[in-house]
Image (cartoon, grey):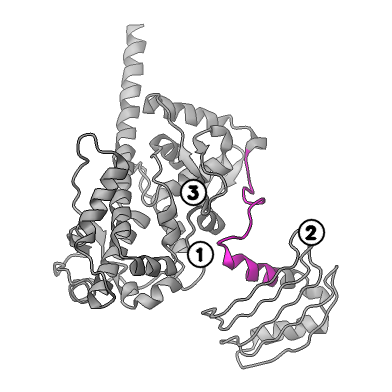
Amino acid sequence: RDGAGRRDSVAASRAVATLSRPIKGEMRARVSWTLVLAAFLALPPFQRERVDEMGFGQVFRIERMRVDPALTQALRSRWDTEASAFAFPWGHMIPSLEDVSRITGLRVYGQAVSGYTYPCYHDLAERLLDLPVERRSSLVPRVAESLGLFEAGKNAGETEDEYLERLARVSRRELASEPGTQADLDLRRFLVLFLGRLLFATRGDAVHCRFLPLLADLGEVGGYAWGAAFLAHQFDGLSASERQTSTSGFYPFLQVWAYLHLPALRRGELTRPGLVPIARRWDSRRDTRHLADQLEHLQEALDSYPYLDVVWQPYLGEGDEGQPWRLWGSVQRFIGRESDRCGRAAKILRWGWRRKRATRAQGASISIGGVTGIAVEIGSWKGVTGIAVEIRSWKGVTGIAVEIGSAREATGIAVGMRSTRG
């Protein structure tokens, strides 16, 4: 009995040691979330509007969620690096772009978040942030301090909300209250902090300069597919060395993904139904058991998880609020599926899309499976000057009109639906 007891004690100690690393990492991420949220709340209204236009506003509407390191570690242990997917007894599952868009509200369409890694960011950081960076370093020092944020702990008896308000109040004193050059500096510093310490966080508290080139023109920041880059960052963190047990980045994403797809684990609580993005609806369920016991229980639960309780399509009942990428994609997919039955009109449409020179296909009318009329007008290949689509009867939708002013930058979209789903 004594020998068995000693073995159990050693196993428990190893489990605790394994869990201590993700706890520190996830707690660091929660502290970073508080700092970034305080900086956002300290921004004047016109700056917060700019952040919202860039597509980041939805993230700051998400409630600060409790960390669930046991769930994160259980999921991480199931990650198959070669397949880039979670390997469960019932098959592989993988977070998708729709998961990112639905859960976080980040945009998954637009220009790719890519560029060059420079050997020296000194001049760029000085010009765009007015902050010093050492000649051979790629890290931005004191970016939080430049926004008036200092990682002071909570005062005795201070609640989370009171602590957040105190940080925001101190930060507000350091920020420009009117548009101008200083306001642009403040916004870039905030974005570097947000991207480096929250959305694309890595191990440690350092903030990397790699996003600086994309922040040179603040008017272009909203045109990037930050949600797609976020998903790639999640994959990169999950595929890191096995010795790294914590997951980098915005931890609520994986937690809510598990709540939606694996509800029988019962790790989340639906406290605010109906809110968008979906992460606003959930909180982590409190579990008072020892972390090693939680991890062991989750591993066993995944091994014996009922196949019929896996939710493969958790968004079937969701509307398209906040999902502008879905409408035009649905029309394109529909036309593509029926292209072999569209006759001459579809051939004209297909030819118009593929030609690089300006082409025009007007008045194409077809009748396919309940769709009594589709009219398509294409003015240009690279700059679509006008697209009109009318569908009189398609899955209960009696009228859809879509107009896109530009192919790469949709300057105007009008959508009218007289009847959706009956």
Is disc 1 surrounded by few (<14), some (14 to 19) or many (20+) residues within 10 Å?
Answer: many
Q: Which amino acid does label 1 sit on?
A: Val
What numbered label is drawn on residue 125?
none
- Residue that badge 2 annotates: 422
Instruction: Compute the Cα span from label 2 to label 3.
Output: 29 Å
With 49 as the anchor, is 369 left or right in this view?
Answer: right
In the picture shown, does residue 256 fall above or below 236?
Answer: above
| Residue at 79% over, 85% down | 364
Residue of label 1: 108
Question: Which amino acid lies under the numbered mark 2 shown in the image of this protein?
Answer: Gly
Q: Nearer the viewer, residue 318 or 290?
A: 318
Where residue 179 sits, quadrant-wise, is bottom left
Q: Please tell me which of labels 2 and 3 falls first in the chain.
A: 3
Q: Which amino acid does label 3 sit on?
A: Ala
Residue denoted by label 3: 279
* Separation of residues labelled 1 and 2 (CA atoms): 30 Å
- Report the magenta residues as a range: 310-333
Q: Can residue 120 be seen in this view?
A: no
Q: How crowded is mark 3: few (under 14 residues within 10 Å), some or many (20 or more)?
A: many
Query: Dot 3: what SS?
Result: helix
Vertical relation: 417 (above or below) 245 = below
Name the front one of labels 1 and 3: 3
